[in-house]
Amino acid sequence: MSQSQSAYDPDANRVAIRIWLGIVSLAIFALVIVGGATRLTDSGLSITEWKPIHGVIPPLSEAQWEAELELYRQIPEYQQINKGMSLAEFKYIYWWEWAHRLLARGVGVLFAVPLLVFWFSGRIERRLRWPLVVILALGGLQGFIGWWMVTSGLVDRVDVSQYRLATHLTLACVIFAAIVWVSRGLAVYSDDPPPSSGSANAAAIITIMVLVQIYLGGLVAGLDAGLAYNSWPLMDGALVPSNLFTMHPVLVNFFENAKTVQFTHRVFGYLLWLAVLAHMIASLARAPGTTHARRTVVLFVLVTLQAAIGISTLLLQVPVSWALAHQGMALVVLAFAVAHWRAFRGSYSLPETVLRPAV
């Protein structure tokens, strides 16, 4: 087969696109971890201006560093928490936030440039074009939401809004999940039938529950709720602690009361674990030995491991390394849950005709 012919071979194109999307997924994984480190080191407000292009270049002289520090001195976090911070201490938090923003820009380039190359060389199937464009648009929206999050901590607060932090984290995970979904649609699956007619719906519900749990984890991080109650299985000396609904209206407690937020995150974690356990038991009972059933076992092991990491992080009073492991494992669970759900739909059917380069 000549080079021109192989360039438009659907199978080869799918392999290339899967490799590209796999690399993007790894980059997003790294981005989320660095974002978590930025939060845990209280670095997120160190850069007080949004410069999408010029911001790639960090301060290069002592005068530029002093100018950046002077901007930081104007915000409440410095005035109420870090007053008197030295330039060396400021550089530490600045580099974390700068690395996070640089990596975010890098992920955008890593997605957009190959997308254009694949598109105009005719290697992207028509059915994939809009999904990939939507993912690119979500990436642009994510950049805006990131800055919207930062602005919440520049005037009246000493940290960012937990609402905006959780939204920023969850959207990153939605983008990550969407990329995994498209990539897995290009994979080859076995012909094993699903354990039941409801198996795919169960997998979908579990995936959505994982995303909800990640959102709740974002609220916990935004309120530093993980630092408040560090015992398990009891919380504040009880299985169901008191004073969960001290704020009014009651609904606000689920977003702004640190005790309620942490308790909700715990309880929803239990529900997720039970849902995955039930899904596994049902699949093994109805279709033992199939790939679908084996995946439920792996998913249950991953969710159980994630629960163990979360409990350990809590008991150890949220050390950075354990907190990042917990955040990273959440993405692993999400990726596998998405892949498991996608497997019930099978691969995208191959196009009937080979696409030619766009003109």
Image (spheres, helix red, strand yellow):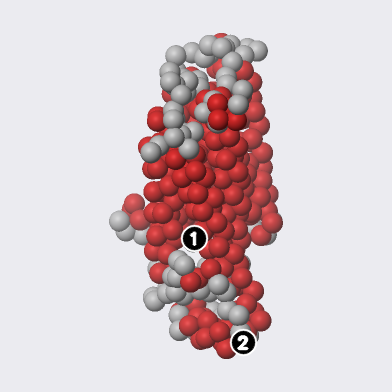
Give percent across and percent down for residue 12.
58, 28
Residue at the image position 55 percent from the left and 35 percent from the top: 17
Give left or right: position of 80 versus 327.
left
Give percent across and percent down for residue 86.
63, 85
Does the image show residue 80?
no
Q: Residue 321, located in which quarter of the rendered image?
A: bottom right
Give left or right: position of 160 versus 88.
left
In the drawing, what numbered circle is on residue 212?
none
Q: Return the disc, 1 or 2, that comes first in the chain's sequence.
A: 2
Q: Which amino acid is tagged 2?
A: Glu
Which element is circle 1 on? helix
Residue at the image position 45 percent from the left and 80 percent from the top: 75
Q: Which amino acid is tagged 1?
A: Gly
Q: Nearer the viewer, residue 231 or 333?
A: 333
Give percent across and percent down for residue 117.
49, 43
Q: Nearer the viewer, residue 223 or 18?
A: 18
Residue at the image position 60 percent from the left and 58 percent from the top: 34
Q: Nearer the viewer, residue 85 or 308?
A: 85
Which element is circle 2 on? helix
Label 1, label 2: how far apart the Cα atoms are = 33 Å
Q: Residue 296, located in which quarter of the rendered image?
A: top right
Q: Residues within 10 Å of mark 1 (few under 14, many from 20)?
A: many
259 versus 357 height, above or below: below
Residue indicated by mark 2? 62
71 versus 299 height, above or below: below
Residue indicated by mark 1? 222
189 versus 64 height, above or below: above
120 versus 342 height, above or below: below
Quarter of the picture holding the N terminus: top right
Image marks 1 and 2: residues in contact by CB distance under 8 Å: no
